Amino acid sequence: MTIKKYDRAVKAVNRFNNILLVIALTGMFIILMLQIISRLTPLFILPWAQDMIIFMLMTSVFLGAGSATDVDKHIRLEFFIHFFRKNTARICLIIADIISILFLGVVCYQAAVLGAQALRTTMGASPVPLGVYYWVVGFGSLVMLLNSINLVIKRVCRQPVGQAPEADAKGGEDK
């Protein structure tokens, strides 16, 4: 697979991830509004609402982390990077991304294993099995892993990283 094909494949995964993120945030908002309405009226009761809001919040965190990694805004300590020369900073970021890739690979594997083991387990009144919680963590970690690999490739090839999708769509770079 060439670098451009890999980049396009990762962008497709990121688009799917962003769609899921919008669905999770919208679902969380709707369930929250229904829960508020159900507290004010005795017409219906939603015992599962709190559990679903927690699930949607957790889902949005991991999907959002994948989206943040896409534009090189994921969690890492960059305070000292700004004191280094450009090439030294680039090498430090490559090393940090490789460490992230290794860690995310372990998280993806463990999420798949634990998700399969806990697929028939439920928590509280939640209609979502516990295994799905693990799979959400695994999917978000997989998106972060793919984006981290893409960042390493771009840094090694000295291509610009951290551009928002809008900048890519316009065909221009930040000046």
Image: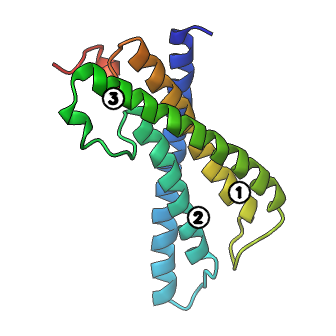
Q: Nearer the viewer, residue 157 or 142?
A: 157
**Residue drawn at point x = 80 percent, y = 69 percent:** 121
The reply to whether dot 1 and dot 3 touch (C-beta < 8 Å) is no
Percent from the top left, x then y, of residue 48? 64, 77
108 over 127 or under it: above or below = above
The reply to whether dot 3 and dot 2 touch (C-beta < 8 Å) is no
Q: Residues within 10 Å of mark 3 (few under 14, many from 20)?
A: some
Q: Which residue is mark 2?
A: 55
SS of the residue at dot 1?
helix
Separation of residues labelled 1 and 3 (CA atoms): 30 Å
* Residue 9 in which image quadrant: top right
Q: Which residue is mark 3?
A: 162
Three-letter code, disc 3: Gly
Three-letter code, disc 1: Val
Relative to 130, 20 lies left or right: left
The reply to whether dot 2 and dot 1 touch (C-beta < 8 Å) is yes
Task: Look at the image and tell me whether residue 11 can be seen.
Answer: yes
Separation of residues labelled 2 and 1 (CA atoms): 9 Å
**Residue drawn at point x = 76 percent, y = 71 percent:** 122
Relative to 166, 31 lies left or right: right
Q: Which residue is mark 1?
A: 132
Percent from the top left, x then y, of residue 109? 72, 44
Q: Nearer the viewer, residue 45 or 14?
A: 14
73 over 95 or under it: above or below = below
SS of the residue at dot 2?
helix
Which mark's residue is nearer the viewer, 1 or 3?
3
> Where's the C terminus, which quadrant?
top left
Mark 3 or mark 2, earlier in chain: 2
